[in-house]
Image (cartoon, rainbow, N blue to C red):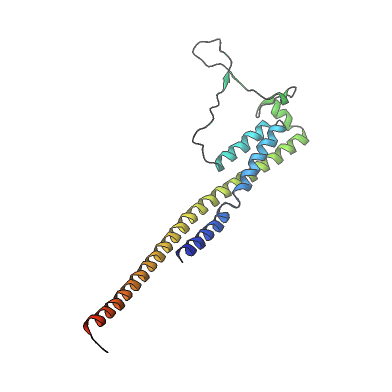
Amino acid sequence: MKKITLLALTLCFLSSCTVYTEKQSEALSQNVYATNDSLDKARVDLASYYSEQTTRLVKIPKKRIDIQSVYQDSTVKGTTGQRIVIVPEQYKGDKVVVVGSAEYQDLLKIKAIAEQLKKDNENFIKAKDSTDKELAKQAEYSSKMVKDLNIMQKKLVEKDLAILWRNIIIISLLGLIGGYIYIRMNSGFRL
Protein backbone atom coordinates (compact mmCIF):
# COMPACT_ATOMS: atom_id res chain seq x y z
CA MET A 1 0.00 0.00 0.00
CA LYS A 2 2.83 2.39 0.94
CA LYS A 3 4.66 1.71 -2.35
CA ILE A 4 1.51 2.39 -4.37
CA THR A 5 0.93 5.68 -2.53
CA LEU A 6 4.55 6.72 -3.05
CA LEU A 7 4.36 5.77 -6.74
CA ALA A 8 1.13 7.77 -7.16
CA LEU A 9 2.68 10.83 -5.47
CA THR A 10 5.80 10.50 -7.62
CA LEU A 11 3.77 10.31 -10.83
CA CYS A 12 1.70 13.29 -9.71
CA PHE A 13 4.90 15.25 -9.00
CA LEU A 14 6.51 14.29 -12.31
CA SER A 15 3.44 15.29 -14.29
CA SER A 16 3.31 18.62 -12.45
CA CYS A 17 7.00 19.27 -13.25
CA THR A 18 6.14 19.54 -16.94
CA VAL A 19 3.76 22.38 -16.05
CA TYR A 20 6.56 24.18 -14.21
CA THR A 21 9.08 23.97 -17.08
CA GLU A 22 6.82 23.76 -20.11
CA LYS A 23 7.33 27.32 -21.45
CA GLN A 24 10.82 27.96 -20.09
CA SER A 25 12.48 26.63 -23.19
CA GLU A 26 10.50 28.82 -25.62
CA ALA A 27 11.87 32.20 -24.50
CA LEU A 28 15.32 30.68 -24.04
CA SER A 29 15.23 29.02 -27.48
CA GLN A 30 14.11 32.24 -29.15
CA ASN A 31 16.96 34.22 -27.59
CA VAL A 32 19.61 31.57 -28.31
CA TYR A 33 18.60 31.20 -31.94
CA ALA A 34 18.25 34.97 -32.38
CA THR A 35 21.82 35.31 -31.07
CA ASN A 36 23.07 32.63 -33.46
CA ASP A 37 21.14 34.03 -36.43
CA SER A 38 22.36 37.54 -35.63
CA LEU A 39 25.98 36.39 -35.71
CA ASP A 40 25.39 34.48 -38.96
CA LYS A 41 24.02 37.65 -40.52
CA ALA A 42 26.85 39.89 -39.20
CA ARG A 43 24.51 41.66 -36.77
CA VAL A 44 26.69 41.76 -33.66
CA ASP A 45 24.50 44.57 -32.29
CA LEU A 46 21.54 42.18 -32.22
CA ALA A 47 23.59 39.21 -31.01
CA SER A 48 24.77 41.27 -28.05
CA TYR A 49 21.22 42.14 -27.07
CA TYR A 50 19.80 38.62 -27.45
CA SER A 51 22.70 37.00 -25.62
CA GLU A 52 22.07 39.45 -22.75
CA GLN A 53 18.44 38.28 -22.62
CA THR A 54 19.60 34.66 -22.66
CA THR A 55 21.85 35.20 -19.65
CA ARG A 56 18.85 36.54 -17.74
CA LEU A 57 17.11 33.18 -18.21
CA VAL A 58 20.03 30.89 -17.38
CA LYS A 59 21.76 30.41 -14.04
CA ILE A 60 25.38 31.49 -13.80
CA PRO A 61 27.55 28.39 -14.24
CA LYS A 62 29.69 27.17 -11.36
CA LYS A 63 32.75 27.46 -13.60
CA ARG A 64 32.49 30.19 -16.21
CA ILE A 65 34.69 30.09 -19.27
CA ASP A 66 37.23 32.88 -18.87
CA ILE A 67 37.06 35.38 -21.74
CA GLN A 68 39.60 38.20 -21.91
CA SER A 69 39.55 41.31 -24.07
CA VAL A 70 42.44 41.86 -26.47
CA TYR A 71 44.19 45.22 -26.29
CA GLN A 72 46.65 46.83 -28.65
CA ASP A 73 49.80 48.07 -26.91
CA SER A 74 49.63 51.71 -25.95
CA THR A 75 52.43 54.14 -26.68
CA VAL A 76 51.85 55.88 -23.34
CA LYS A 77 53.07 53.91 -20.34
CA GLY A 78 50.58 53.18 -17.59
CA THR A 79 47.52 53.18 -19.81
CA THR A 80 45.74 50.30 -21.41
CA GLY A 81 45.81 50.21 -25.16
CA GLN A 82 42.82 50.33 -27.41
CA ARG A 83 40.57 47.27 -27.25
CA ILE A 84 40.42 45.27 -30.46
CA VAL A 85 37.17 43.78 -31.73
CA ILE A 86 37.98 40.38 -33.21
CA VAL A 87 35.48 38.86 -35.63
CA PRO A 88 35.35 35.45 -37.31
CA GLU A 89 36.63 35.04 -40.83
CA GLN A 90 33.06 34.96 -42.13
CA TYR A 91 33.00 38.76 -41.66
CA LYS A 92 36.08 39.28 -43.85
CA GLY A 93 35.30 41.99 -46.36
CA ASP A 94 32.26 43.28 -44.44
CA LYS A 95 32.09 46.91 -43.41
CA VAL A 96 31.98 47.53 -39.65
CA VAL A 97 29.67 50.29 -38.40
CA VAL A 98 29.49 51.18 -34.71
CA VAL A 99 26.04 51.86 -33.24
CA GLY A 100 25.65 55.57 -32.51
CA SER A 101 28.55 56.64 -34.76
CA ALA A 102 28.27 59.15 -37.60
CA GLU A 103 28.23 56.28 -40.11
CA TYR A 104 25.38 54.68 -38.16
CA GLN A 105 23.45 57.96 -38.23
CA ASP A 106 23.98 58.06 -42.02
CA LEU A 107 22.52 54.54 -42.27
CA LEU A 108 19.41 55.73 -40.42
CA LYS A 109 18.81 58.23 -43.24
CA ILE A 110 18.28 55.33 -45.67
CA LYS A 111 14.57 54.46 -45.45
CA ALA A 112 14.91 50.67 -45.88
CA ILE A 113 17.64 50.42 -43.25
CA ALA A 114 15.78 52.73 -40.86
CA GLU A 115 12.68 50.52 -41.20
CA GLN A 116 14.76 47.38 -40.66
CA LEU A 117 16.35 48.85 -37.52
CA LYS A 118 12.93 49.98 -36.27
CA LYS A 119 11.64 46.42 -36.76
CA ASP A 120 14.74 45.10 -34.94
CA ASN A 121 13.99 47.44 -32.04
CA GLU A 122 10.39 46.17 -31.90
CA ASN A 123 11.77 42.62 -31.78
CA PHE A 124 14.07 43.70 -28.92
CA ILE A 125 11.06 44.92 -26.98
CA LYS A 126 9.16 41.68 -27.66
CA ALA A 127 12.16 39.58 -26.60
CA LYS A 128 12.61 41.58 -23.40
CA ASP A 129 8.91 41.29 -22.62
CA SER A 130 8.99 37.54 -23.31
CA THR A 131 12.06 37.17 -21.10
CA ASP A 132 10.49 39.23 -18.30
CA LYS A 133 7.32 37.13 -18.45
CA GLU A 134 9.38 33.93 -18.43
CA LEU A 135 11.36 35.05 -15.39
CA ALA A 136 8.13 35.93 -13.58
CA LYS A 137 6.68 32.51 -14.47
CA GLN A 138 9.84 30.77 -13.28
CA ALA A 139 9.66 32.60 -9.95
CA GLU A 140 5.96 31.72 -9.64
CA TYR A 141 6.55 28.09 -10.58
CA SER A 142 9.50 27.83 -8.22
CA SER A 143 7.33 29.10 -5.39
CA LYS A 144 4.51 26.77 -6.42
CA MET A 145 6.91 23.82 -6.62
CA VAL A 146 8.16 24.43 -3.10
CA LYS A 147 4.59 24.77 -1.86
CA ASP A 148 3.51 21.59 -3.70
CA LEU A 149 6.51 19.68 -2.37
CA ASN A 150 5.70 20.78 1.17
CA ILE A 151 2.08 19.69 0.73
CA MET A 152 3.14 16.32 -0.69
CA GLN A 153 5.64 15.84 2.12
CA LYS A 154 2.95 16.65 4.68
CA LYS A 155 0.55 14.19 3.02
CA LEU A 156 3.24 11.51 2.97
CA VAL A 157 3.93 12.05 6.68
CA GLU A 158 0.18 11.89 7.39
CA LYS A 159 -0.09 8.64 5.44
CA ASP A 160 2.93 7.19 7.26
CA LEU A 161 1.39 8.22 10.57
CA ALA A 162 -1.95 6.65 9.59
CA ILE A 163 -0.16 3.42 8.63
CA LEU A 164 1.73 3.47 11.94
CA TRP A 165 -1.52 3.93 13.90
CA ARG A 166 -3.15 1.15 11.91
CA ASN A 167 -0.23 -1.14 12.71
CA ILE A 168 -0.37 -0.19 16.40
CA ILE A 169 -4.11 -0.93 16.48
CA ILE A 170 -3.60 -4.28 14.71
CA ILE A 171 -0.79 -5.26 17.08
CA SER A 172 -2.87 -4.17 20.08
CA LEU A 173 -5.87 -6.19 18.88
CA LEU A 174 -3.65 -9.21 18.25
CA GLY A 175 -2.21 -8.77 21.75
CA LEU A 176 -5.69 -8.59 23.25
CA ILE A 177 -6.84 -11.65 21.34
CA GLY A 178 -3.65 -13.51 22.29
CA GLY A 179 -4.05 -12.46 25.92
CA TYR A 180 -7.67 -13.52 25.95
CA ILE A 181 -6.77 -16.90 24.47
CA TYR A 182 -3.89 -17.31 26.95
CA ILE A 183 -6.04 -16.42 29.93
CA ARG A 184 -8.83 -18.66 28.77
CA MET A 185 -6.50 -21.62 28.20
CA ASN A 186 -4.62 -21.21 31.51
CA SER A 187 -7.45 -20.33 33.86
CA GLY A 188 -10.12 -22.68 32.78
CA PHE A 189 -12.35 -19.65 32.43
CA ARG A 190 -15.48 -20.37 30.40
CA LEU A 191 -17.95 -18.06 28.92
Where does residue 173 sit, x and y in percent of width and height?
32, 76
Q: Residue furthest bottom?
A: 191
The residue located at (38%, 68%) in the rendering is: 162
Between residue 115 and residue 75, name the one nearer to us: 75
The residue located at (57%, 56%) in the rendering is: 19
Between residue 163 and residue 92, name the one nearer to us: 163
Q: Is residue 62 left or right of residue 167?
A: right
Where does residue 23 sit, x and y in percent of width and height?
61, 51
Q: Is residue 42 left or right of residue 2?
A: right
Q: Is residue 184 left or right of residue 95?
A: left
Where does residue 180 sit, x and y in percent of width and height?
27, 80
Which quadrant, please, contains the C terminus?
Answer: bottom left
Where does residue 177 sit, x and y in percent of width and height?
31, 78
Residue 92, quarter of picture: top right
Look at the picture and state if 99 lies above or below 139.
above
Is any part of residue 103 visible from this angle?
yes
The residue located at (39%, 64%) in the rendering is: 160
Look at the picture and state if 76 lies above or below 57.
above
Between residue 71 and residue 98, name the one nearer to us: 71
The residue located at (50%, 52%) in the rendering is: 142
